[in-house]
Every structure is written in C-alpha cells, then in structure tokens.
Amino acid sequence: MDVLAGLNDEQRRAAEAVRGPVCILAGAGSGKTTTVTRRIAWQVASGAFRAGDILAVTFTDKAAGVLKSRLAALGAAGVEARTFHSAALAQLHRYAPAAVGRILPTKALLLRQIGNSLPRPYRFRPAADLATEIERAKNMRIPPSEYLARLGDHEPPIPRDLMASVYQEYERRKASRGDIDFEDVLELAVRLFETDGHALADVRERYAAFTVDEYQDVNLLQQALLDLWVGPRDDLCVVGDDYQSIYGFTGASPRWLLGVAERFPHATVVRLEENYRSTPQVLALANRLVPRLGGAEKVLRPTRAEGAEPGVRAFAQPDAEDAWILAEVRALLAAGTAHEEIAILCRTNARLADFEEVLHEAGLPFQGSSLLGREAARRLLRLLEHDDSLQVAIRVRALAEEAGWLVHPPDRLGERELTRQADLARLIRLAEEFDDGARTCAEFVVELRRRFDPGGESARGVHLLTYHRAKGLEFDAVFLPRLDAGEMPWKLARSPAEIAEERRLLYVGMTRARVHLSLSCSRRPSAFLAELGVGAQPHAKPASRVRDSSPAAESLRRWRLERARSEGVPAYVIFPDRTIDEILARKPGSESELAAIHGLGPARLSRFGRELFGAVREALAAA
C-alpha cells in the first residue's frame, strides 16, 4: 500500500517529514486529517518509528477514534491515539494509582449546590457558566488562593469575590469527597512527572514521537504536560489553524502553535492552503477576513468548480430576515438539497431559539438546538406538566420571576445566563399568547412540545448550531443570520483579543459552507460586514409584514409602551405587533370582541382589558 498516494504537494511534503519538529498549518477544508494520518502511517512504513512508539493526541474521544480507524486501515494499527486526558489518566493509573480519586463526570451538580447558597440575584446563574470559569482558571494553573490577584481585566460571570468563594468552596467540597475533575487529571500528571524522575524517564522511553492535532486549542496545563512528555527531544508534529482558535474563554491560546518556529528554529513548517470543501466564491469572501486575522497567513485556494455568489442581505426587522431565510431554505429543499445539508449558525443558543419557532411554524424539521432542552424550559415544564391552573400567563410569569428572570439583564452576564434570561422572556411571551382562559398550564406544556420538540436524539432536519458547535463540520448550505452589532461580535467581547476571537468565529462559520453561503443582518450591521466589504449593501426589500405606521397603530403602540413601563416589562410582553394588526383589521366593538383577538387572553384582559378597549376606541375614532 502506498500511503502517500493521492496527496497534493503540500500534504506530501508534510507527510514525508517523519523526523524532527514539524508544524502543519492546516487551513479549513485542506485535508488535515488525511495529512496527519498519512504522515503517521509513513513514519511507521518508512521505518522511522515503530507504531507502538508513537503517541497521537487530539481533543475528543471521537477524533481519537477516527485517527485509530484510519491508521489501522493504513497499516499502522499499533499507534496510540488518545486525548490529553485519556493519556494522562492512563499514566496516573500506571505510576501513581493512589492519586486517582473518583472522577466527577460533570462539575454542574456540585456547583449547583454551591450556587444555591449565593445571594438571590446570582442564585440561579447556570452552573455551566461557573464551571467554565473554574476550568479557565485551572487550565491556566491558577489555584483559588491566587484567583483574585490574577484576574487582570478578565470579568467572571458573577462578581469577583463571589466567584472566588465559589471556586474555593468547589475545591474544598471536591477534596473532602475524594473526587477529582478532568483538570485535576492533567495537573496530577504534571506534578507526577515533575517530582518522579523514574516515571518521567519511563514515559519518555515509552514514546519516541508525538503528534498533536488541533494544537491551536492547547492551554497552559496541556502544554506543560506535553513539554514533560517530549523533554529535550524534538520529534514532535503539531497540527492546527490559528484562524480557527475560538476557545479563549477556556484558557486556550494559539500562541504555542504560532511559537513553534521560535522554539524550534529548524522546524519544518508546511502550510496546507488547497481547500477541498468550498466553492471559489465562498472562499473569496472568507479570504477577505485573512488580512485581519493575524498570525500565520493562510489564503485558501479552491479546488472545486465554480458556484453561486454568497448572498448578503440587510433587513429592517428580524421577522423580515427570518422570512427570507425560510424562503431560501424552502428553495434549497425544492432544488434537492437534503435537510441535513442545511445549517443555520448563530452566536448564541438564545438566538437559535428564534429559528426554532420559524422552522416549527413552517413545518420543517430541525436538529441541534432545543429551547426545551435548556435549563429554563426544563424546569418550567417539570413544574407545569400536571398543573390544571387556567391562569397560564400569570403562573409562567411567577415561575420565571422565582427563577430569577430579569426584565433588563445587566451587562457582563455569562453567555449561558444571557441565554437563560432570553429563554425565560420567550416562555413568558409564549404563555401570554397561549392564555385564553380555557386551556390549562398542562396544555401549555403540550403546546410547547408540539412547537419546539425537534424529535429527540434521532431527529433529522435543518441544523441549528452555534458557531462553536459547528467547528469541524461542513454543509452544502450555511446561513449566518443576525450579523448585527452586539450579536457578532458578541456584546461582551470588548478587548482587542476578544474581538479578534469573534472575528475568527465568523471565519469558522463562513468556511463551513460547501456551495451556498448566506450572510444577513436585521438591525445595525456588524463591523465585520464592513471588513468583508459588504457592509454598504442596500437593504433588501422586506420579505414579510410591513410595519403599520398609521396613526391608529402608532396610538396603540404608545398605549402599549406606557403600559409596559408601568408593569416594568418589555413592550412585547403586553402584546406583539401582530395583535395590533388584528385589532385594526377586525375593529372590535366590545370587550368580548376584543377578547377574541389572538394574543389577548383572559390573563391580559383581567389586567388591562377595559383600559385597552378605551385605547382601541380612541385609536379607531381617530383613524
């Protein structure tokens, strides 16, 4: 078997460099996995190393499994392919089994218990936000005792002193139970090799050559362990793309990838720039970001046939943007594109929920995102599924307030908490729209499941994914909506480094597309669109309902705004614009006729029905 057959010149150069330090800068869609597996297989086939002397490290068990299966097919079945954590754990079991406690499968349960003791404004913050902050600190090798002193400009998801106390208590409780977490596995391995010369010598004798995939996502803790494994030797191959370094919030950094040439001046550096995924048109647009991405320049070159120009649209309102995307998705489906080959990518899960509603109402299946699978809805459904109360809107609002819903969420909330707040607000609005005085809370749960349940793990349909979850995937058609200021870049990204990571996120999103790529915004366009040279595109014609700006409609909007301010809620919670449209179309002559209008259930009318009817009469009389 010729393991180098079919490689392009760049890939072959990388694969044939079987000794010494090698840095493979692999652009998106450039055949990275093919190159890595062929290089390892050639290391074995050429006699440079025995299969058992090679350790290939990647970041997920799935990726490690792919490496193993491909290497086996190439005749290199004895190569060990593991994640950092898997390799470290195996070494701990071999050299220091007493140090290995019970490994926590998740930090969330312990942190939820600790979080319940926080002051009320912070009590319901998602445990995952707290876990991410602790993981960041531990990946940067910052113990609780140094946490506050080493925060710098970084802002945690809750006030600094509270976060420090949570971190301290988490470590205390974990230790008292004899548990360790995944970061502890790496830290314990580092300490083992720093203090046990016999174990260090043994592991270095065990492995003679190393390959590390996704090297742009390495953090300080992983790099410390890798340095101990490799020692003074240089048979190290690292593979990555600094343009796709998007996990800075976990402590990851592309600096080690970009620093290979300085650390190893004699390193072989290969750039993989031939792209086998995307059309020339998709790559031409993505490459416009390259001058601003910094790092090691890589300009992707197409190998596929010509395709359609990427679509770039601007809309005055989100509902117009949604209607356009829906029409485009239907056109793709009609032309033969499979549901599973279409993806809608957003910066946050909260924004993806917009498209859950759009696709459900259109009868189109989806997968990936689920409002009902997130914390806010799970808790609410659990409390309401056997509730026979007819006061749906009042009950949902009360549960949301009990769960810490904020009418105006403050800045610097963690991303998951902002998603939770948005989910709570959405559930309140849906309850207001559902409440007709005749249906129960339990029926509201049924309706939510009808509208939002994507069908479980085996569901097939249009992909709804965050940019982070889309990394490593590819689709025939990709939509990147809500490219608005505050959305992309994300509003919490303020430092130059944070803005740079947001730009890389957009690049990752764009390079997921094979054939069709569409970018759109619906408010103030993102500065990134200007960087792409498309920020001055004219607004597309609205693809959905035009806002009624008649005097009668504006009169009702003013009344709604005053009512919202008096209740301390957003205007849409009082009733949505489509309710105003229906009022003006049906011209109700009595409070009972007003009650028949969509979005005005008994819960609303019991609060302000008489006042609203008076406002309607005034608006209609002035029309």
Image (cartoon, rainbow, N blue to C red):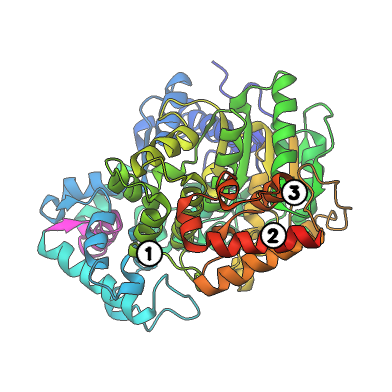
> For residue 500, what is the image quadrant?
bottom right
The label number, if any, that marks residue 520 in the structure image: 3
**Mark 1 or 3 closer to N-term?**
1
Disc 2 crowd, CA 10 A, few/some/many (<14, 14-19, 20+): some
> Up-down: is 35 above or below 417?
above
Which quarter of the image is occupied by the N terminus? top right
User: Residue 256, image x and y in percent?
Assistant: 52, 60
Let me know if residue 137 is in the magenta part: no
Q: Amino acid at mark 2?
A: Arg
Q: Is 204 positioned to the left or the right of 36 in the image?
A: left
Nearer the observer: mark 1 or 3; the answer is 1
The label number, if any, that marks residue 617 in the structure image: 2
Q: Residue furthest front?
A: 590
Q: Residue furthest bottom?
A: 149
Q: Which residue is mark 1?
A: 401
Q: Residue furthest top?
A: 1
* Whether residue 107 can be seen here: no
Real-space Cα distance between discs 2 and 1? 34 Å
Q: How many marks?
A: 3
User: Residue 535, image x and y in percent?
Assistant: 83, 57
The label number, if any, that marks residue 612 in the structure image: none
**Mark 2 or 1 closer to N-term?**
1
| Residue drawn at x 61%, y 39% as measured from the top left | 358
Q: Secondary structure at mark 2?
A: helix
